[in-house]
Image (cartoon, grey):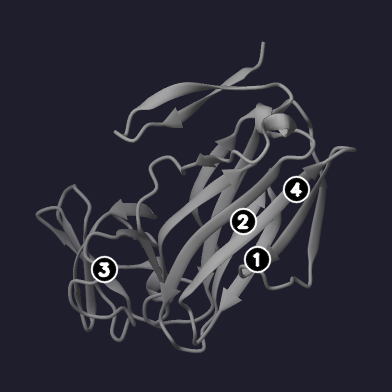
Amino acid sequence: MGSFIHVYTDGGGIRECRVPDDFSGIGSVPFILKFPGFKKCLLASLAASGNQASRTSNIVTIAATAHGVPTGATYVGFRFFYPGSASLAAGWYDSITDVQTNTISFNAPGANFGSENVNGGVAYTTLTDVASLTVPAAFMSPGTNMSLVGYQGGDTTSATKQIRTYLNTLNVHTHGVTTTPFVRFQGSNILVEGGKSYGHSGFDNLSSVTEYLQSITFGADGTFLVKASLSAASAFIYIPTMELTLS
């Protein structure tokens, strides 16, 4: 009978698409899975100490001296990760409204509040969830190739700007860049006979020093998760686009 998945249409709607039970016979036709709700996003470590935030008329402004994000309109409209304070939970907020040399402002509806410590007043260097999606069971079958492809940029300091991907909670792709952060990244996993996932990690066609192996339960949905982190204060990373291709 085959299985069905939900796919996005050109107009932004969702329709059902039939997937044969023997998905390995699909040939060269790939399926592209979008991350639900994903928008271009920016993660910042902010300053080394003394980060303060306040909210007025639904706009939160963080005072972080030398936060490292370029001023101007370049990143206005990007989703922004807020590390959290007493009156506002940590999480992704949509979106940045203004970037000045020592401040960053973003939308976050709610009651006004005065000056509060952000992330305890220190730089934010925690590994952070960026986006996730469910891989339908029909794709978790022998011979399926998964390939995450995206683009990232960030500051040009020596701080490490890292992206990690996970399949069913196992880290299957890790890469970090420093002074040359602008890169098209790719990480692949191949599901093979015997219930194993072979993971390759790298930039495009560059080789990897690590191969990741894990057991796979065929016939069950999988979870694909992307995380990011920064190693030092005054660094940032942004991801404008990424998608998971299955063939």
Q: What amino acid type is highlighted by mark number 2?
A: Thr
Q: CA distance from mark 4 to mark 2?
A: 14 Å
Q: CA distance from mark 3 to mark 4?
A: 35 Å
> Which element carries disc 3, helix, strand or loop?
loop
- Mark found first going from the N terminus, 2 or 3: 3
Q: Residue 9: name its quadrant.
A: top left
Residue 142 visible in image: yes
Q: Which residue is mark 1?
A: 174
Q: Position of residue 166 (x, y in %)?
A: 65, 52
- Mark found first going from the N terminus, 3 or 4: 3
Dot label at residue 190: 4
Count neighbours of disc 4 (C-alpha within 10 A) and say few if under 14, some if 14 to 19, many if 20 or more: many
Q: Position of residue 215 (x, y in %)?
A: 83, 42
> Which element carries disc 2, helix, strand or loop?
strand
Q: Foreground residue, 220 or 231?
A: 220
Q: Residue 83: name its quadrant.
A: bottom left
Q: Which residue is mark 3?
A: 75
Q: What amino acid type is highlighted by mark number 3?
A: Tyr
Q: What amino acid type is highlighted by mark number 1?
A: Thr
Task: Evaluate if marks 3 and 4 touch, with contact meaning CB atoms under 8 Å apart.
Answer: no
Task: Evaluate if marks 3 and 1 touch, with contact meaning CB atoms under 8 Å apart.
Answer: no
Count how many numbered circles sit on residues in the image.
Answer: 4
Q: Which residue is mark 2?
A: 165
